C-alpha cells in the first residue's frame, strides 16, 4: 500500500527575523513584568540558598574530622539546613506559580489571537490551510512556544546561575581539581543537545505513525460494512500488521536514544566523581584540601549535572519555540484576499444582482471557472442548471461574497459590491449548500444558528417548510436531539433539510440554495419549493439543481456550460430551444416513468 | 493527540486484581526470555548503582583518612579503588542502556501481538455489535488503550522494579552500616509514600480535567474552522469568538490549578530531602563524636540519601500509570472476550459448485426489540434469474441482503443457497459465493488495479479480460492512467458513479454465483450510468442476481420484481404483471418513489 502523505513542513528554516517574531510575545512579557520579576528573583534566591547547603555540610564535616565539633554546634548547623529548606520550599512555590503560570497566560493570549484571526479569513485561506494544519498550529506550535517561555526560561536562568556559582565555589576549593572534574561535562552538554533534537525528530515520527495507525483503524471501523461486504477482514489485518511493525521499529529507535541519553548523564557525573576520588583524594592526603572540601566538592559536582544537561535541552527548546513562533507569525500575517470597504451604508437595497462580463478563477488555480457571465438576478425564483464543473456553485459563492471578484463585474442593486462593506452584502444573503456543515449541538441550536433569538414557533415553522419537522419529532429527544458523534447521525437528506431550515430562519432578502436538496426525495423537494414560494413572496431565490421537475417550478432558468450562460428562459421555452435541456428532460422522464 | 471526541472517563483498574495480572503476564510468555534478560539487567543496574557510593566510602575511610599509613601506600590504594569505581561506572552505563532497549522491545512485541489479535477479532465481530458501538470507543481500544498498557511495560517494569529494588537495597546497606541512622531514614519511606500518593491522586484528577477541557476546546475549534464559511455567512463571528474565549479561559484556569498543585507538592518532596540531610548531620554527627560512625560512612549516608529520594518521588507517578494501564487492560480483555454472534460452522460445507438458487423461508428479523424490520418474508429466486427489490426507504430491502450475507442472523426462519442452509458455509466462503456491489466502496490508496485485485490471485490479464467482457473497459479508459491510475485521497477522486463501477469490477473478478447490486440512490453522471447499464446487462446474464433497484430501466430488465412494504413482500411478478395488478407497484412507479427512494 502506498502512502500518499503531504509533508508537514517540520523544517527548522525560519522565514522571519527574530525581532519580528519577538513582537508577538514581547507585549505579553511587558504586561506581566512584575510577575516575571518577582518570579525570577525567587528562582535565583532559591539557587543561592541551595548552594549554601554544601557549605554548611563542609563546616560540619570539617568540625567532626578535626574534633572541634560539639553537639550544640551540630544542632545549630542542622537547624540552618532546615531553615534553608523551608525558605527554598516557599520560594519554589512562588516561582513555579509566577513563571510557569506566565507561560500559560502567554499561550492563552496567542491561542485567542490565532482563533480571532481565522475568524476574519476567507475561504481562499481555508482552501490552503486545512483545519488539521491550523489545529496543529494551535496545539503543537503553541505548546512549543509555551515550553520555551516556561520551563525553557526557568531552566536557562536556573542552569546559568547554578552552574556558574557551583563552578566558582569549586574553583575556590581547588582550580586543578575543578578542571579535572569538569572534563567530561562539555561532552554531556553536546550529547544532550545532539540527542534531544534527534529524539524530538524520532518522537515525531512515532507520533505520526501512531496517527497513521489510528487513522487506519478508524477508517476500517467506519466502513466496517464495506470491509465485511467485500470480505476484506484478513486483507486489512495484514496491512495493519505492516503498519504495526513499522510503529514498533520507530519506537525502538526512540528507546535507543532514551536508553543512551539518561544513563549518559549518570556516566558523566560518575566520571567526575571518579576524578574527585582519584585526584581529590591525593589532595586531601597531601593536606592541600580538607576532607570537608572533598565532600562539598562532590556535592557541587552533583549540582552541576542538571544545569549542564539543561544547556543542551534549553538550546533545543528555544530553537523549537522560535520555529513554532515563526509558523504562528506566518499564519497571523496572512490577510484575506477578500477585502470589503469600511464605510457606513445607510440605504436599503432591493435584492437585485447584476453580473457584468464576470470572469473568475479560484485564487490557487489559473483556469477561469466563469468566462464572461452576464446575468441579471431579480426578485423571484431563478433556477440554475448545467453539467458538473460548469460554474453553478461558483456563482452562488460569489453572490455570497466568499471569493473576491474584479471591479465592475458584480453589482448589488446598482452598486459595485467592491465598494460596499462585506457585511452589507452578506447580510442580504441566506445560504444552503449541497454538503452542509452542521455543528455538534442540538438540532434546535443548529436551526437557530444564525438567529439565536428566534422563538420556538419560528424554528418549528422553518423546519416544517424545509420538510424536516416530522423527521425531528421522530427522534427521541425531538428538537433537543444532539447531532454528531454524541448523538444521532443524520442522513445526507436530513442534513440538507436542517441546513435549509437554518437558512430559512436566517430570514434574508436573498436565498441561495446551492444544490441543497440533491439528497432529498423529489416529492419533498416539490413541497419545499412550493412552501418557499408562498412564504417568501418578493424575495430573490436562486436554486441550483439537476432535477427537471424542480426547475420546472421556477420562474426562469439559466443553463451554464463551461463557465458561460448558454441559454436562459422559462421551462417551456428551454424545452423548445435547448438540446441539453431536452436531453436532461427525456432521460429523467424515462427513468421516472412519468411524463411531466 | 486525536481522540475523536471520545474521552474515557477517568477509569482506574484495581491493582490488587490478581486474575488480571495473571492474564497480562501470560501475554509475555512468547517472549519470556526477553523478560528474564530484563530482570537480570535490572539487578545488575541496581547493584552497580549502589556499589558506587560504597566504593567512595571505602576510598575515604581506608585510604584518604588513613593518616597512619605511608602516603605512597595510600595513593596506591586510592588508585585501586578508583579503577574499580571506573569499571563499575562503565557497567552501570551499559546495563542501563540495554535494559531500556530490552524492555522497549519486549513491550512493543507483546503489544503488537495483542493489537493484531484485537484488530482481527474486532473486524470479525458481528455488525450488530459493531454498529451499536461509537467508532471512537473501538478506536481507543485498539490504539490508546494498548498504548497505555505498553506504558506500563516499559516505564513501570523498569522503574517499579528498579526503584523498589534500589530502595530495598539502600535500606539493607544502611542497616548494615548503621542501624540507628538507617531506622531514621526508613521513617521517610511511609511519609513520602503518603505524600506522593496524595499528590498523584490530585494530579490525576487535575490532568484528567485538563485533558477533558482540551478535547472540548479542540472539538469546538475543529468544527469552527471547518465550518468557518457558515459562521461568516450567518454573521456569527462575535459569538464564536466569545464561545472560544470561554473555553480557552477555562482551559487556562485548569492549567493554572495544576501548576499550583505542582507548585505545592514538588517543594514539599524536595523539602523532605533537605530534612533528611539535616537529620543525618545531627544524628550522624553525634555518632561520629561518639566514635560509632566514621566520616566516610557519614558521607556515604548523605550520598545514599540522594539515591533514596529520587525513586520514592517517582513511585507514586508509576502507581497511577499502573492504575490506568490496568483499566485499559480490563477493557481490552473484555473486548477480546466478546463472542461473535455470527457463529462459524464447526465443519463448513465443502461444496465445489454451489447452485445459485436462493430461498428465504419465513424470515422474521428485528434490529431493535419490538420493531420488526422483516416479518414472515418468503422468497424463492431460481438460479440464473434476476430479481429486483423495490420499495420505499425502510421497507426492508437492505435488511434482506444483510441477512443473506450473514451480517445479521434472522430471529426466525432460514435462508438457503443452492439448497444448503447458509449457516453451514463458513462466512468467508458464503461471502465469496455471494458478491455484493454496494453503493459505496472502501478505497485503498493505490492503483485501480490493486483496488480491484486486492488479496485475490487474479492476474492483470484476467482483470482486463473480465472488464472487456462486461463493458467496463470504458470506465478504465476514462481514467488518466487506465488501470494504473492511483485513486483515493491524494490521487484521482472517483465520482459516485465511478465508485459503484469500481465496486462492480471488484466483485466481478471474484466471479460470484450470486450477484447483488445496491443501486446508487444519488444521481450519477450520465456516462457512468451508461456504462453501468451495459455492465449490468452483461454481468447478469446466466447469473442469479438481486438488485435493490431505484431506476425504472434496471427494474424493467429483471425477470421478477419483489415489492416490499413495511418488512413484507407484498407483490411479486414481472413488470407487466404488476402494472396490470394496479397495486403498490403501480403506486410506487407513478409516485416517483422508484426513481429516488
Image: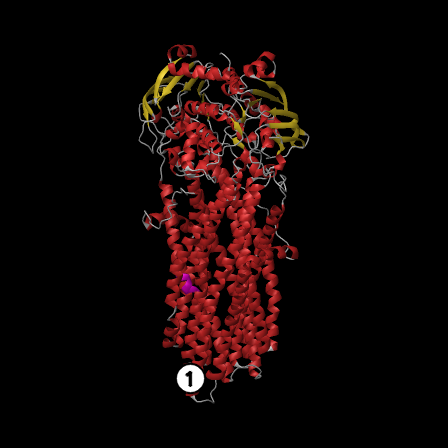
A224 lies above or below B14: above
Q: Position of residue A244 (x, y in %)?
A: 48, 49
Q: Chain of mark 1?
A: B
Residue B364 falls left or right of residue B453: right
Q: Secondary structure at mark 1?
A: helix
Q: Position of residue A101 (x, y in %)?
A: 48, 53
**Where does the magenta region start and end?**
A306-311
Residue A393 image-quadrant placement = top left
Coloring basis for residues: secondary structure
Mark 1 closeness class: few <14, some 14–19, many ≥20 residues within 10 Å: some
Residue A523 falls left or right of residue A581: right
Q: Position of residue A226 (x, y in %)?
A: 52, 35
In this view of the protein, can residue A80 be seen by the observer? no
Q: Label 1: which residue? A: B75
A173 lies above or below A561: below
Q: Residue furthest front?
A: B352
Location of the C terminus of chain B (image quadrant): top right
Amino acid at each position: 500500500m502506498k502512502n500518499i502523505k503531504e509533508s508537514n513542513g517540520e523544517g527548522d528554516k525560519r522565514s522571519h527575523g527574530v525581532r519580528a517574531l519577538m513582537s508577538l510575545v514581547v507585549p505579553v512579557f511587558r504586561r506581566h513584568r512584575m510577575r516575571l520579576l518577582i518570579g525570577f528573583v525567587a528562582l535565583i534566591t532559591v539557587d543561592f540558598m541551595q548552594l549554601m547547603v554544601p557549605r554548611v555540610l563542609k563546616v560540619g564535616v570539617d568540625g567532626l574530622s578535626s574534633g572541634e565539633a560539639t553537639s550544640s554546634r551540630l544542632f545549630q548547623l542542622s537547624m540552618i539546613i532546615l531553615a534553608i529548606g523551608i525558605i527554598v520550599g516557599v520560594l519554589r512555590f512562588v516561582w513555579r506559580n509566577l513563571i510557569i503560570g506566565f507561560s500559560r497566560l502567554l499561550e492563552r493570549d496567542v491561542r485567542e489571537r490565532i482563533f480571532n484571526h481565522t475568524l476574519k479569513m476567507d475561504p481562499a485561506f481555508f482552501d490552503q490551510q486545512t483545519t488539521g494544519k491550523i489545529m496543529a498550529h494551535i496545539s503543537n506550535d503553541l505548546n512549543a512556544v509555551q515550553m520555551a517561555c516556561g520551563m525553557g526560561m526557568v531552566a536557562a536562568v536556573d542552569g546559568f546561575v547554578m552552574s556558574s556559582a557551583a563552578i566558582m565555589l569549586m574553583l575556590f576549593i581547588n582550580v586543578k581539581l575543578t578542571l579535572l572534574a569538569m572534563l567530561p561535562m562539555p561532552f554531556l552538554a553536546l550529547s544532550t543537545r545532539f540527542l534531544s533534537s534527534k529524539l524530538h525528530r524520532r518522537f515525531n515520527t512515532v507520533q505520526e505513525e501512531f496517527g497513521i495507525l489510528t487513522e487506519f483503524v478508524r477508517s476500517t471501523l467506519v466502513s466496517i460494512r464495506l470491509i465485511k461486504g467485500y470480505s476484506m477482514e484478513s486483507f486489512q489485518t495484514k496491512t495493519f500488521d505492516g503498519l504495526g511493525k513499522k510503529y514498533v521499529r520507530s519506537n525502538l529507535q526512540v528507546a535507543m536514544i532514551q536508553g543512551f541519553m539518561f544513563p549518559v548523564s549518570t556516566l558523566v557525573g560518575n566520571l567526575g566523581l571518579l576524578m574527585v576520588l582519584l585526584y581529590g583524594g591525593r589532595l586531601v592526603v597531601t593536606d592541600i584540601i580538607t576532607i570537608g572540601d572533598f565532600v562539598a566538592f562532590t556535592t557541587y559536582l552533583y549540582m552541576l549535572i542538571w544545569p549542564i544537561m539543561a544547556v543542551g535541552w534549553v538550546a533545543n527548546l528555544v530553537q523549537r519555540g522560535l520555529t513554532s513562533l515563526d509558523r504562528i507569525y506566518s499564519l497571523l500575517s496572512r490577510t484575506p484576499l477578500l477585502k470589503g470597504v469600511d464605510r457606513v451604508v445607510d440605504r436599503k437595497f432591493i435584492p437585485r444582482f447584476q453580473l457584468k462580463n464576470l470572469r473568475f478563477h479560484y485564487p490557487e488555480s489559473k483556469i477561469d471557472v466563469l468566462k464572461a457571465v452576464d446575468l441579471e438576478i431579480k426578485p423571484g425564483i431563478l433556477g440554475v442548471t448545467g453539467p458538473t464543473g460548469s460554474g453553478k456553485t461558483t456563482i452562488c459563492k460569489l453572490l455570497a461574497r466568499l471569493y473576491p471578484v474584479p471591479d465592475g463585474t458584480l453589482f448589488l442593486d446598482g452598486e459595485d459590491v467592491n465598494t460596499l462593506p462585506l457585511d452589507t452584502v452578506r447580510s442580504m444573503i441566506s445560504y444552503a449548500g449541497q454538503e452542509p456543515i452542521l455543528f455538534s449541538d442540538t438540532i434546535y441550536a443548529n436551526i437557530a444558528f444564525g438567529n439565536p433569538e428566534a422563538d420556538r414557533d419560528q424554528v418549528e415553522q422553518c423546519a416544517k417548510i424545509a420538510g424536516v419537522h416530522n423527521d425531528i419529532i421522530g427522534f427521541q429527544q425531538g428538537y433537543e436531539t444532539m447531532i454528531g458523534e454524541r448523538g444521532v447521525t443524520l442522513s445526507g437528506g436530513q442534513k440538507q433539510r436542517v441546513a435549509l431550515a437554518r437558512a430559512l430562519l436566517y430570514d434574508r432578502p436573498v436565498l441561495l440554495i446551492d444544490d441543497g436538496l440533491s439528497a432529498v426525495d423529489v416529492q419533498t423537494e416539490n413541497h419545499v419549493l412550493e412552501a418557499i414560494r408562498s412564504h417568501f413572496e418578493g424575495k430573490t431565490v436562486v436554486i441550483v439543481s439537476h432535477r427537471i421537475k424542480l426547475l420546472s417550478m421556477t420562474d426562469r432558468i439559466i443553463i451554464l456550460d463551461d463557465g458561460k450562460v448558454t441559454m436562459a428562459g422559462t421551462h417551456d421555452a428551454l424545452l423548445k430551444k435547448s438540446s441539453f435541456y431536452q436531453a436532461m428532460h427525456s432521460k429523467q422522464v424515462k427513468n421516472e416513468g412519468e411524463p411531466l | 493527540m486525536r481522540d475523536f471526541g471520545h474521552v474515557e472517563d477517568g477509569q482506574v483498574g484495581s491493582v490488587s486484581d490478581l486474575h488480571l495480572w495473571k492474564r497480562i503476564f501470560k501475554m509475555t510468555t512468547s517472549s519470556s526470555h526477553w523478560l528474564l534478560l530484563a530482570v537480570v539487567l535490572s539487578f545488575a543496574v541496581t547493584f552497580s548503582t549502589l556499589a558506587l557510593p560504597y566504593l567512595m566510602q571505602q576510598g575515604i575511610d581506608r585510604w584518604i583518612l588513613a593518616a597512619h599509613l605511608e602516603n605512597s601506600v595510600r595513593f596506591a590504594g586510592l588508585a585501586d579503588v578508583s579503577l574499580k569505581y571506573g569499571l563499575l561506572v562503565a557497567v552501570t552505563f551499559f546495563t542501563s542502556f540495554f535494559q531500556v532497549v530490552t524492555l522497549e522491545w519486549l513491550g512493543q512485541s507483546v503489544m503488537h501481538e495483542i493489537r493484531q489479535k484485537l484488530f482481527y477479532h474486532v473486524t470479525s465481530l458481528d455488525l450488530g455489535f459493531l454498529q451499536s458501538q461509537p467508532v471512537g470507543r473501538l478506536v481507543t481500544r485498539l490504539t490508546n488503550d494498548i498504548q497505555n498498557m505498553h506504558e506500563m511495560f516499559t516505564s513501570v517494569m523498569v522503574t517499579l522494579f528498579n526503584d523498589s529494588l534500589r530502595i530495598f537495597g539502600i535500606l539493607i546497606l544502611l542497616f548494615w552500616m548503621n542501624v540507628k541512622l538507617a531506622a531514621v531514614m526508613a521513617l521517610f519511606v511511609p511519609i513520602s509514600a503518603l505524600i506522593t500518593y496524595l499528590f498523584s491522586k490530585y494530579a490525576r484528577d487535575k490532568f484528567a480535567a485538563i485533558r477533558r477541557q482540551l478535547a472540548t476546546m479542540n472539538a469546538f475549534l475543529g468544527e469552527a474552522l471547518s465550518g468557518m464559511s457558515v459562521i461568516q455567512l450567518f454573521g456569527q463571528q462575535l459569538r464564536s469568538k466569545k464561545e472560544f474565549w470561554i473555553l480557552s479561559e477555562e482551559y487556562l484556569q485548569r492549567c493554572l490549578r495544576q501548576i499550583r498543585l505542582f507548585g505545592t507538592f514538588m517543594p514539599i518532596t524536595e523539602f523532605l530531602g533537605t530534612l533528611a540531610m539535616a537529620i543525618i548531620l545531627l544524628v550522624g554527627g553525634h555518632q561520629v563524636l561518639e566514635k560509632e560512625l566514621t566520616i566516610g560512612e557519614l558521607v556515604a549516608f548523605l550520598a545514599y540519601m540522594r539515591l533514596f529520594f529520587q525513586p520514592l518521588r517517582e513511585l507514586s507517578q508509576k502507581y497511577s500509570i499502573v492504575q490506568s494501564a490496568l483499566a485499559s487492560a480490563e477493557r481490552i480483555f473484555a473486548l477480546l472476550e466478546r463472542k461473535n454472534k455470527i457463529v462459524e460452522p464447526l465443519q463448513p460445507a465443502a461444496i465445489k459448485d454451489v447452485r445459485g438458487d436462493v430461498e428465504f423461508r419465513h424470515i422474521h428479523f428485528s434490529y431493535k426489540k419490538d420493531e420488526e424490520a422483516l416479518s414472515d418474508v418468503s422468497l424463492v429466486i431460481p438460479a440464473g434469474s434476476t430479481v429486483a427489490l423495490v420499495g420505499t426507504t425502510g421497507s426492508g430491502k437492505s435488511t434482506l441482503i444483510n441477512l443473506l450475507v450473514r451480517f445479521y442472523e434472522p430471529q426466525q426462519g432460514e435462508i438457503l443457497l443452492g439448497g444448503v442452509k447458509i449457516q453451514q458455509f463458513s462466512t468467508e466462503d458464503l461471502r465469496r459465493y455471494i458478491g455484493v456491489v454496494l453503493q459505496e466502496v472502501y478505497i485503498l490508496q493505490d492503483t485501480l488495479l490493486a483496488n480491484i485485485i486486492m488479496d485475490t490471485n487474479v492476474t492483470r490479464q484476467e482483470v482486463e479480460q473480465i472488464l472487456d467482457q462486461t463493458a467496463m473497459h470504458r470506465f478504465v479508459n476514462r481514467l488518466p492512467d487506465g488501470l494504473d491510475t492511483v485513486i483515493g485521497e491524494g490521487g484521482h477522486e472517483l465520482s459516485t458513479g465511478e465508485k459503484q463501477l469500481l465496486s462492480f469490477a471488484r466483485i466481478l473478478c471474484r466471479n460470484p454465483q450470486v450477484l447483488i447490486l445496491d443501486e446508487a440512490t444519488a444521481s450519477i453522471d450520465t456516462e457512468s450510468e451508461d456504462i453501468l447499464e451495459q455492465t449490468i446487462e452483461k454481468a447478469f446474464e446466466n447469473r442469479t442476481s438481486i438488485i435493490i433497484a431505484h431506476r425504472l430501466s434496471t427494474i424493467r430488465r429483471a425477470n421478477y420484481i419483489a415489492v416490499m412494504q413495511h418488512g413484507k413482500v407484498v407483490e411479486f411478478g414481472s413488470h407487466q404483471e404488476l402494472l396490470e395488478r394496479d397495486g403498490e407497484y403501480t403506486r410506487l412507479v407513478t409516485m416517483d418513489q422508484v426513481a429516488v427512494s
